[in-house]
Image (spheres, rainbow, N blue to C red):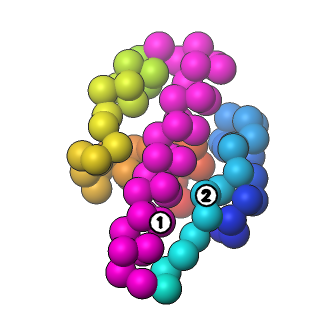
Amino acid sequence: MKSGETILTQQGIETTPYPRIDWTTNRRAINTQKREHKWLLDNALRVAEQINDEWNLFMFGCMKIGNLSDSDLASLNDYLFGGI
C-alpha cells in the first residue's frame, strides 16, 4: 500500500488512510513500523465497533501498540483482510 491510500476491509468498510512510509534510516523505519501497527489496530477496533463485534472489540482492546506479537499482527490482518 502507498501512504494515504485507503482500501476496503473484508467487511466492506473503508480503512483510514495508510500512514506515512519512510525507510531511509533505521530510526525512520522503526517509526514507520509503529505507525503501521497503530493503523492496523485502530482500523480493526473501528471495524469491530461498526459491525458490533463485541468479542473482537474486547480482544483488540486488550492489545497494546508497543507490545504486539506476531500472532496479534496476524490476527489483525486476518480480521481486516481475510487470509492473505
Give yes or no for residue 18 being in the magenta stretch.
Answer: no
* Label 1–label 2 contact, CB within 8 A: yes
Q: Position of residue 3 (x, y in %)?
A: 68, 65
- State the residue in front, 34 or 81: 34
In the rendered image, is residue 78 in sight? Answer: no
Q: Which image quadrant is residue 13 in? A: top right
Q: Which residue is mark 2?
A: 19
Quick one: quadrant of the N terminus? Answer: bottom right
Q: Quote the CA–CA distance across marks 1 and 2.
A: 8 Å
Q: From this viewpoint, which residue is outermost toward the bottom?
A: 24
Amino acid residing under circle 2: Pro
Q: Position of residue 37 (x, y in %)?
A: 44, 52
In the rendered image, is residue 36 in sight? Answer: yes
- Please give left or right for residue 41 compared with residue 71 in the image: right
Label 2 crowd (10 A; few <14 / some 14-19 / many >=20): many
- Which residues fall within the magenta stretch? 25-54
Residue at 54%, 75% (x, y): give it: 22
- Which element carries disc 1, helix, strand or loop? helix
Amino acid residing under circle 1: Thr
Q: Earlier in the sequence, mark 1 or mark 2?
A: 2
Residue at 75%, 41% (x, y): give it: 14
Label 1 crowd (10 A; few <14 / some 14-19 / many >=20): some
Give yes or no for residue 40 being in the magenta stretch.
Answer: yes
Q: Position of residue 84 (x, y in %)?
A: 53, 60
- Please give left or right for residue 66 compared with residue 57 in the image: left
Residue 51 has which mark? none
- Please give left or right for residue 67 compared with residue 17 in the image: left
In the displayed structure, 24 sits above or below 62; it is below
Q: Which residue is mark 1?
A: 32
